[in-house]
Amino acid sequence: MKSLILHIGTHKTGSTALQQWFSANDEKLRDKGVLYPSSGRPVTGPVWGHHLLPWAIQRRRGIDSEKVWAELKKEIEASNAHTVVISSEEFDDLSKAEVARVAEHLAPWSLRVVIYLRNPYDFMVSYYKQIVKSGVCRKTFPEVLRASAGRCNYFRICEAWSAAIGGNLPDIRMYDRISEMPGILADFSTVFSSQQSVIPSDLVEHRRNISPTDRTIGFISFLNRFEGRLEGVFERKRVFAALRRKALRGHGVGKLMVTLSMPFVKASFYDVDDRNWLRSQLESSNAKLAANYLSEEDMSYLAF
């Protein structure tokens, strides 16, 4: 029976770096008996991860669920690989019923679910920075925090996947323990048996994304909200996209814009009230997480 490793994120835990490496090395992996399927991956946008699979389960973007999953199963069955790796952080947002449907699709194989958990508050800060940088967010951090806090309910995620795999515990790993050293790739290599050597032990990881400063994000958030007031203005999107890029580069005109905004943009877009609010929201679910899934040491990485 083939072994299937299902990496489900969560978001903002190095999933893209992991997917890019597997995608770039898929031919070499086949020689080692490891299949990183081409089925289930988008042809445009984030092409490295198997995002079509959870999107199909949720019936998002008009995706034909049966077709997408049938293509994946056909590719797995036709492969001589002994191990299959599927990766998408979009799996972390599925409901319990949707998770059960994923498990049904993957029932023919020996399933191992791998999940990385990140400090909830750090996750929300990182998530907010991402959506502000993209220009799609015109809300303040407190507004986004209160609308998206459910994404930090790790007990819900662990409980759904545990039930789907017959009450077995998912392979839960703490992102904050490994984010700098040894890194996501080196840590994920331990998912495989020591005899497989799927990911080179001497692989050097390079951090691709340098996070912008809080003040820069505060300024871009201000830009986004101001842009929202100019609906219908000619070439508004192009102009504000250019301003965001300059601010993110952090030098020249962009640095000057951020500096000039200092009198009316806060140095930080979050405060202690946000932290306390999120802590109170997660108190109950984190207690269940500690009782059922994580050790005291693991829980320490989730404290804030």
Image: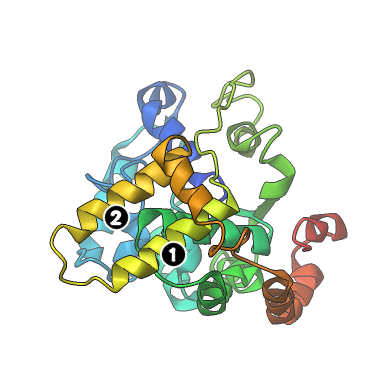
Q: Amino acid at mark 1?
A: Phe
Q: Is residue 178 left or right of residue 149?
A: right
Q: In this picture, is 229 found above or below 122?
A: below
Read off the residue under disc 2. Answer: 240
Q: Specify the farthest residue to the left.
A: 234
At which x and y percent is residue 105? 38, 61
Residue 132 in the image: above or below residue 157: above
Q: Which mark is residue 122?
A: none
**Residue 56 visible from this viewpoint:** yes
Q: CA distance from mark 1 to mark 2?
A: 11 Å
For the point 64% across and 32% down, which residue is it?
193
Q: Quadrant of residue 67?
A: bottom left
Residue at (24%, 52%) from the top-left corner? 239
Residue at image position (69%, 32%) is: 182
> Considering depth in this image, is 146 or 226 the residue closer to the camera?
226
First of labels 1, 2 by sequence position:
1
Toward which corner of the image does residue 113 lie, by quadrant? bottom right
Vertical side of 64 occupied by 243: above or below: above
Q: Which labelled disc corresponds to residue 222? A: 1
Coordinates of residue 27 in the picture (x, y in percent): 35, 24
Q: Secondary structure at mark 1?
A: helix
Task: Give above or below for 78 relative to 93.
Answer: above
SS at mark 2 in the image: helix
Q: Residue 28: image x %, image y %?
A: 41, 21
Q: Is residue 142 left or right of residue 243?
A: right
User: In which quadrant is the C terminus drawn?
Assistant: bottom right
**Depth check, front residue: 153 or 168:** 153
